[in-house]
Amino acid sequence: TRGSSKRFFPFILSKSGRLGSRGETMPASARAFERVLDAVHDVLAEQLGFWQMLRLAQTSPTFLSRVCGRARDLSGVYEFHSDIRKIEVRQLVALLRRCAGLRTVNMSGWTIGGKFVCDEVMYALAAYCTSLRSLTMDRGEITDCAVATVARVHTDLVELNLHGHKQLTDGALRAIAQHLPKLEKLDLGACKGISDSGVVALATRCTALKDLSLDHTRISDAAVSAVAMNCPLLEDLSLWD
């Protein structure tokens, strides 16, 4: 159960690299653990949040290979605690490498860890998570190049949240416009580097948009008019501040 992983998965890697407990090799326990995973890996992949998955992936090669590949939703930011600061970006990338079936990635608020909403993670998502449909990467340090890479690979994305990336420019919007025609929900709030030109290009190509946020941006009437003329399915338009 959530919050009880230590009780049910007390395994760590021994110095010899074999799965054990308290630093000693325990092949019988390792085999028993593998049998449990074979029986319940689908349920584990569905129920475990990000933090538990990352901890177990680091302590069990079996978990990493058999469960992570069945994960479809990676979120669980609210399970973070102070130990998350010990996790490195490379460890998250290693986890993503095994999570090829992910359809939803929500990293809202992941700057608690201080480093996860970044280009390196975006490139990992592009390289390994080819089934992605919904991506939230807000309030981090992502560049136009990383957004363009994800857009080129994940052409079936229907939801994209890039709220708060002040360094993004119209280049990112043109890449989204070119490669994401199925996009239905887009949040560009507080992306102060974008302008009317980028929004016009976006509205002209992403005509399936239903929900668009342009809060805290410097757009003018030209951008809003382009959205009005080209996005007939629009249901929510946010222009706060």
Image: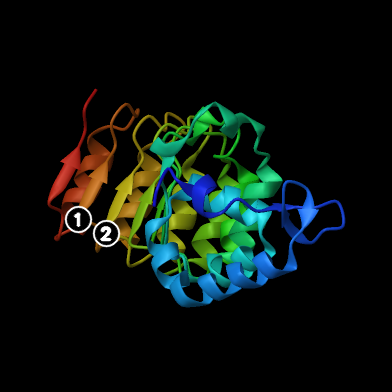
Q: What residue does disc 1 label?
A: 210
For the residues labelled 1 and 2, say whether their Cβ atoms are less than 8 Å apart: yes
Which residue ends up furthest to the top in the rendered image?
241
Which residue is rendered at x = 46% and y = 32% of the image?
A: 139
Query: Where 223 sits versus 128, above or below?
Result: above
- Tag 2: residue type? Glu
- Tag 1: residue type? Lys
Position of residue 98 measured from the top left corner of the image (x, y, whole percent) = 61, 65
Which residue is rendered at x = 51% and y = 38% of the image?
A: 168
Q: What residue does disc 2 label?
A: 184
Q: In this image, 165 relative to 186: left or right?
A: right
Which residue is rendered at x = 56% and y = 31% of the image?
A: 113
Which residue is rendered at x = 59% and y = 67% of the image?
A: 33
* Quarter of the image where the C terminus is located: top left
Position of residue 37 measured from the top left corner of the image (x, y, whole percent) = 53, 70
Position of residue 80 measured from the top left corner of the image (x, y, whole percent) = 47, 35
Label 1 – label 2 distance at C-alpha? 5 Å
Query: Where 16 sits versus 118, above or below?
Result: below
Q: Residues within 10 Å of mark 1 (few under 14, many from 20)?
A: some
Q: Is residue 127 visible to the viewer in this orientation of the structure?
A: no
The one nearer the camera, 17 or 46, is 17
The one nearer the camera, 204 or 150, is 150
